Amino acid sequence: MEKVKLIATPQSFPCARIEWALRIKGVEYEYIQEDLLNKSPLLLESNPVYKKVPVLLHDGKSIAESLVILEYIDETWKDNPLLPLDPYERAQARFWAKFIDEKCVVGVWGACVAQGEEKKKAVDAALELLAFLEKLIQGKKFFGEKIGYLDIVAGWLSYWLNVLEELGEIELLNAERFPSLHEWSNNFIQTSPIKDCIPPREMVVEYFSFGINYVRSLASKE
C-alpha cells in the first residue's frame, strides 16, 4: 500500500491547494503539521533547496512546490483529472497558473504591504492583474467544466484574499468591479471538499499580520 504524507501548515494557501487536490482525487494521506518558526528536520531534509511547505511525500520520495505537486498528483492518480485532457487547454491552464502565482499573488501582496504614496499605485496594479482573471472566468461557474487545476491555484482568492484586504486596508475583489470573479469565489469556497480544508480565520490573520509587519519594518529601515 502506497504511503502519502503532506508536510504543511493550515494557514498557507499553497498547502491548501494540495489538500484540495488529494481530496478531489480520493487519495488518503497523513497530514504532518509544520511549525514555520521552528522548521523540522523532516522538512529541511525533504525540501533542502527552498525549505518551505508544502512538501508531498509519496513512498518516501519528496515533491516540493505547490504547482509541481499538483501536476504530480494529477499524473499519479488518474481519477478525477485536474488538468484538461486537450494539450492546448492544458498549456493554457499552466500559463494562467503561472500568471496567478508570479503576477497576482505578488501584486496583491505588494498592494497590502505598500504604504504612503506607493499604496494607490500598487492597488491599481493589482486591480489590472485581477481584471485578466475576471475576463477569463466570465460566463463560467468554474475555470473548467468542474473544479480543476486552475480553480485550485486561484483558490486563495476565495478566502485568503479577504484577510489580506482587511489587514492591508484595501478592497480588490469587489462584486461590482469583478462580478464574475466574485461569483466564482463564492461558488468555489462553498463546494466540498474545498470548504472542508479552510483554516480558522484568526489563524490566517495572525499568519499574514506577521508577514506584513515584517516587510514594513524592513522598508522603514531603508
Image (cartoon, rainbow, N blue to C red):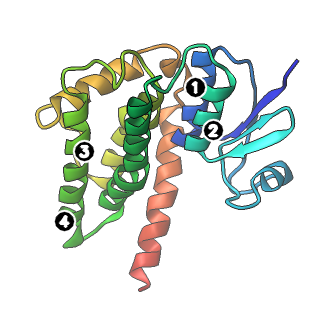
Task: Report the residue at 47% width, 51% height from top.
Answer: 208
Question: Are discs 1 and 2 less than 8 Å apart at CB?
Answer: yes
Element class at badge 2: helix
On the image, the x and y values in percent for residue 139 come to 19, 21
Element class at badge 1: helix
Q: To which residue does mark 1 refer?
A: 21
Q: Which of the two discs, 2 and 4, labels the residue nearer the N terminus?
A: 2
On the image, the x and y values in percent for residue 183 come to 24, 23
Residue sticking out furthest to the front: 87
Residue 69's disc number: 2
Query: What is the quadrant of residue 197 in the picture?
Result: top right
Q: Which of the two discs, 4 and 3, labels the residue nearer the N terminus?
A: 4
Amino acid, disc 4: Lys
The 10 Å Cα crowd at callout 1, few under 14, some 14 to 19, many 20 or more, is many
Task: Report the residue at 60% width, 32% height from top.
Answer: 18
The 10 Å Cα crowd at callout 4, few under 14, some 14 to 19, many 20 or more, is few
**Residue 159 seen by the camera:** no
Distance of mark 3 from mark 2, alpha carbons? 25 Å
Distance of mark 4 from mark 3, alpha carbons? 15 Å
Amino acid, disc 1: Ala
Q: Nearer the viewer, residue 123 or 2?
A: 2
Q: Which of the two discs, 1 and 2, labels the residue nearer the N terminus?
A: 1
Residue 121's disc number: 4
Q: To which residue does mark 3 refer?
A: 130
Tell me: residue 213, above or below residue 29.
below
Distance of mark 3 from mark 1, alpha carbons? 24 Å
Is residue 37 found left or right of 186 in the rendered image? right
Distance of mark 1 from mark 2, alpha carbons? 9 Å
Is residue 56 found left or right of 13 in the rendered image? right
Q: Which of the two discs, 3 and 1, labels the residue nearer the N terminus?
A: 1
Task: Report the residue at 60% width, 43% height from top.
Answer: 68
Element class at badge 4: helix
